[in-house]
Amino acid sequence: MMGDKLRLLKEDITQLHVDAIVNAANNALEDGAGVNGAIHKAAGPELNIACRALHNCPVGQAKITKGFNLQAKYIIHTVGPIWRGGNKGESKLLASCYYESLKLALENNIANIAFPAISCGIFGYPANQAAIVAIKETANFIELHPEITMVYFVCPEESAFEAYEQALNTYCHE
């Protein structure tokens, strides 16, 4: 059953013991605010050097670095779309963030991965809509690729947690 491979956590993503965590990055892959800032701080200064060598990342794409000082072996950096009302291709770009991140996970033999609520912070994507995109795209991917054994959605903020919980319950129990 799909729900057995998708879990929701209200934790600090930087503290998880998983193969990879996903960073909700900016285009320049630089240290920033929110989860991005927390990941950069926890991973240490080597992460900034590694990110500079990757030379930016377009919206909807993903790149990978080592985890450095994190428990996670890897950090997959993806750039989510800025919410502009929902009619500018945001859902397609957000789905691409999950797809491209999971594709990189597969290519790097990553079996378990943790995602933050991509684009739900300063990028302004409504959590209830983002959660549906995240759950559907992830569930579809792992159904085709059983090598991914566990995906965590990490939402320490109550509103995002509730949105993801509702989407998970709806989508995984249809």
Image (cartoon, rainbow, N blue to C red):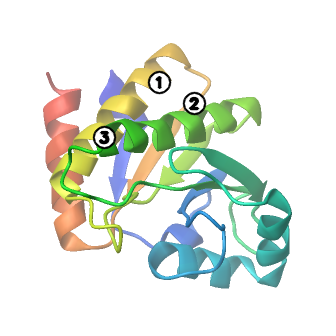
Element at label 2: loop
State whether residue 69 is above or below residue 165: below
Disc number lying in front (2 or 1): 1
Element at label 1: helix
State whether residue 89 is above or below residue 63: above
Q: Alpha carbon of mark 1 to alpha carbon of mark 3: how far?
A: 16 Å
Apparent side of residue 35 relative to residue 166 in the rendered image (left or right): right
Nearest the viewer among 71 and 21 is 21
The amino acid type found where label 2 is placed reads Ile
Residue linked to disc 1: 141
The amino acid type found where label 1 is placed reads Phe
The amino acid type found where label 3 is placed reads Ser
Residue linked to disc 2: 148
Q: Which residue: 16% across, 26% down?
A: 173
Apparent side of residue 138 relative to residue 91 in the rendered image (left or right): right
Q: Earlier in the sequence, mark 1 or mark 3?
A: 3
State whether residue 75 is above or below residue 1: below
Q: Which residue: 20% across, 48% down?
A: 86
Is label 2 in contact with label 1 (beta carbons under 8 Å)? yes
Disc number lying in front (3 or 2): 3
Disc number lying in front (1 or 3): 3
Q: Give coordinates of residue 88: x percent, y percent.
A: 28, 45
Q: Residues within 10 Å of mark 2 (few under 14, many from 20)?
A: many
Residue linked to disc 3: 91
